[in-house]
């Protein structure tokens, strides 16, 4: 899964890297962005312009607005293998695709009965866009909210965790945001997403708490 990530790019970098035409987000930086918080998201407006906005990370499950059993439960990740078919996601997959801006993310590796935090850094001069879907007020949400899509881990990240966020560089952002893209082509895109190198290192358990949000969160663990 993807439960925490880092976004430390300047607004000017995001605008340049993703050809953003409208900015409606303050682009607040974070070294430890957690579910439930606002995240910077790239969407495509009806006229085709790309706009950077803020959304809450985590969407309500299908029909939860009408269910009294778990009104507070939120979903933060969607599996790429089934995102086009699951009732919670399929409508958004067809109509409301977006990109969550990120420079890297955290995962926790099981080891000796403990969960060891790692930071996985995107080795790119530009931030990456994490494939995501969004809902709005007409979907039973008070505010626009989003969910990040994950896939089976590959390469060096596989030894850390079995899942990873689907990350697109600028050259694939257009296809993901294009409302005319076919479902079959989008599913292929999700299967061949990561085209930028990553590096990874162990970090302090400071990241276990979202209260800790400062540069030392991504520093390699000494010793």
Image (cartoon, rainbow, N blue to C red):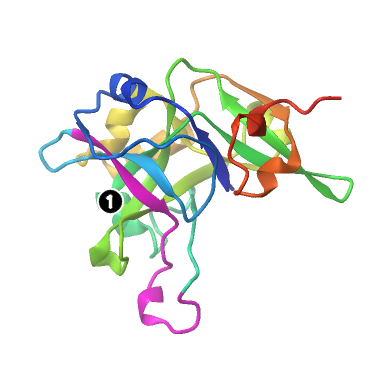
Which residue is at a point 21% across and 42% down the rendered structure image? Answer: 179
Position of residue 194 in the picture relative to residue 208 (left or right)? left
Outermost residue toward the right? 112
* Residue 114 image position (x, y, % from top left): 83, 48
Q: Position of residue 194 (x, y in %)?
A: 50, 27
Which quadrant does the C terminus fall into?
A: top right
> Image point 67% across, 42% down: which residue?
207
Location of residue 56 in the rendering, given as x and y in whole percent from the top left corner: 39, 53
Residue 71 image position (x, y, % from top left)? 45, 76
Let me know if residue 156 is in the magenta part: no
Residue at point 58%, 40% (across, down): 213
Answer whether residue 80 is visible to the viewer in this image.
no
Q: Quadrant of residue 98?
A: top left
Q: What stretch is highlighted in magenta?
A: 50-71
State the residue in front, 123 or 152. Answer: 123
Q: Horizontal placement of 215 versus 89: left or right?
A: right
Residue situated in front as seen by the camera: 117 or 134: 117
Q: Residue furthest bottom?
A: 68
Label 1 belongs to which residue? 94
């Amino acid at each position: 899964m993807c439960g925490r990530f880092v976004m430390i790019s300047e607004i000017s970098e995001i605008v340049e890297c993703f050809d953003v035409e409208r900015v409606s987000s303050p682009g607040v930086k974070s070294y430890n962005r957690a579910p439930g918080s606002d995240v910077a998201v790239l969407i495509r407006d009806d006229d085709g312009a790309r706009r950077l906005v803020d959304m809450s990370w985590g969407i309500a499950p299908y029909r939860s607005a009408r269910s009294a059993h778990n009104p507070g439960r939120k979903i933060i990740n969607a599996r790429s293998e089934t995102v086009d078919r699951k009732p919670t996601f399929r409508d958004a997959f067809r109509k409301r695709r977006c990109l969550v801006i990120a420079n890297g993310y955290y995962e926790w590796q099981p080891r000796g009965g403990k969960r060891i935090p790692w930071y996985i850094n995107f080795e790119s001069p530009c931030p990456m866009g994490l494939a995501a879907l969004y809902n709005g007020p007409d979907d039973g949400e008070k505010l626009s909210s989003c969910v990040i899509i994950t896939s089976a881990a590959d390469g060096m990240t596989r030894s850390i965790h079995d899942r990873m966020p689907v990350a697109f560089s600028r050259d694939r952002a257009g296809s993901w945001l294009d409302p005319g893209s076919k479902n079959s082509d989008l599913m292929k895109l999700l299967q061949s997403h990561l085209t930028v190198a990553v590096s990874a290192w162990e970090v302090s358990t400071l990241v276990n708490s979202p209260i800790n949000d400062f540069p030392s969160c991504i520093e390699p663990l000494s010793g």
